Image: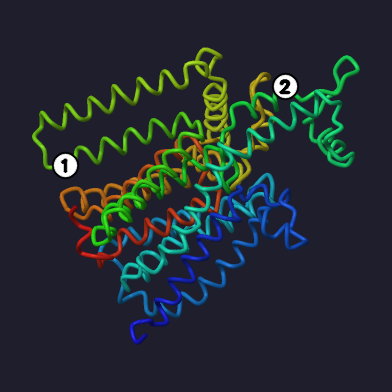
Amino acid sequence: MKNFTASKIYALAFGLFLGLCIWKFGNPVILDHKIIAPNSAADFLHNPWPPHWASLILLVFVIIGVFFIGSPKKILPKNRWLVWLPLAWLGWQFISSATTVDAPLTEVTLWQYSGCVACYFLGLLLFARENLLRWILPGILAAFTFCLIRAVDQKLIEFPAERQAMVEGQRSGWTNFPPETILSMKDDGVIITTNGAEIINPVILKKMEKGRAYGTLVYPNALAGIILLLWPLSLALAFGATKNLKPPIRFAAIALTIFLGGTAFFATDSKLGWLVGMIIAGLFLLRLKWSVKMKVAAVSVILIFGLGSFALRFHSYFSAGATSASARFDYWRAAVQITQAHPLTGSGPGTFQRPYARLKAPDSEMARLTHNDFLEQFSDSGIPGGLIYTIWIVLVLILIGKKLWRTDDVLHFAIYAGVLAWFIQGLGEFELFIPALAWVAFTLLGLQIGEKRIQIDRKLKKY
């Protein structure tokens, strides 16, 4: 018990908090006003919680964490830009908020961005210095496992059962649903009236047929993001940390990790996630101590198999016109226009939806966010905000990659691969706005560049 220090208790609690974020704070912060606070035990257990609750809890952790960090001068990294760039980015967000077109949206966004920077510095200045990775991971991985189980259940059991119940309801004249449930479904557009008959909304039925799982997060692509972020780490631990267990137990742990992650990832039906996953698999192959010919052959197999599977799995999507991809191009076009119109401070953090409502193409679906975390910075906070954020993230990822590329530290390379994959996916998503994703990613990012390297177990370095 003498090794169970206050800093370790703090790290364990912080990891549990990040796990709570994965469980309950999986919605974008700009939807805070739409997330109704739970008012019963069942609501607390089953429903998402308002994102601003996460900010308040994190604030308490940050205040306590400052006392554990101590004097920053003694622990600042040699590359001081690792400190000044994130502070400059956050500072510019507050400057750009002065000209925002929507103060409430900007306020919740500033809380979210402040949380990202706070998690980054906790990882950089505390968790890395005190070798606290092993104490953070239990809460994160427990919640990640629950999220995967939830996604697999949705895909294999829950969604098929819901679809069957809806089809039976339409066939029986909705006699299998309580009147209040039918009214609610009508209000939500799930049931519509056509030619005097009440039927399932064809759009809703089509989504139910696809059965795209989302786990505990806002939608399927966000689930793909958390899998890209944490599954490499989970696999590294499954293979490396179980070497001393009995073979049946080790096999079960590895098989369960592969099954849950693979099935949930497949169930997201994420096109971008699939492509990013191929990139990360290629990186792992290139690090192997094989001959150049072997590496080229292995990467070629990944490309052929991955792209071939991609084409087969999503051929109907592309034959239908790749509507979501086309919509993203319209979002990005609008983001460029907004940046041109407001090059210095943008439209205000988190406010893309306001100018986009005026700029969008007539046939494009309305969007609240740019679906590109980097372009979002330019449109929301101007060229300075976009450049600072992009330079910060790119330089940090290059620094960590150079540090880990030639080492045998499989665990830390797996963490890096997950963080890298998450930021790459940010080119087509809005995960910077989701506490469950962004705060975990920035904690791991800061932890990775701490001056003292963390080792959970030296035996994990090679296997």
Residue shown at 18% from the left, 42% from the top: 287
Q: Residue at x 15, y 49 (%)?
A: 406
Q: Quick one: 256 or 82, which is closer to the camera?
A: 256
Instruction: Bin the neighbour count of mark 2 within 10 Å (Cα to Cα): few under 14, some 14-19, many 20 and up.
Output: few
Q: Is residue 292 left or right of residue 337?
A: left
Estimate the x, y position of residue 264 in percent, counting from the top left.
Answer: 48, 40
Residue 159 location, quadrant? top right
In the image, residue 61 sits, relative to residue 419, either above or below, namely below
Q: Residues within 10 Å of mark 1 (few under 14, many from 20)?
A: few
Looking at the image, how many numbered discs can be counted on the residues?
Answer: 2
- In the rendered image, which residue does mark 1 sit on? 288
For this rendering, which residue is in front, 87 or 54? 54
Q: Which mark is residue 212?
A: none
Question: Please, is residue 258 above or below residue 128 in the view?
Answer: above
* Quadrant in which the N terminus is drawn: bottom left
Would you identify the image quadrant in which residue 178 lies? top right
Return the residue nearer the eye: 421 or 260.
260
Q: Residue at x 69, y 46 (%)?
A: 102
In the image, 231: left or right of 432?
A: left
- Three-letter amino acid code at the position of disc 2: Pro
Q: Earlier in the sequence, mark 1 or mark 2?
A: 2
Q: CA distance from mark 1 to mark 2?
A: 49 Å
The reply to whether dot 1 and dot 2 touch (C-beta < 8 Å) is no
Q: What kind of element bears circle 1?
A: loop
Regarding mark 2 in the picture, which secondary structure is present there?
helix
Mark 2 sits on what residue? 202
Picture coordinates of residue 419 (x, y %)? Answer: 37, 48
Colour pattern of the rendering: rainbow
Above or below, 81 relative to 27 = below
Q: Is residue 88 above or below residue 331?
A: below
Q: Residue furthest bottom?
A: 2
Kind of residue indicated by mark 1: Leu
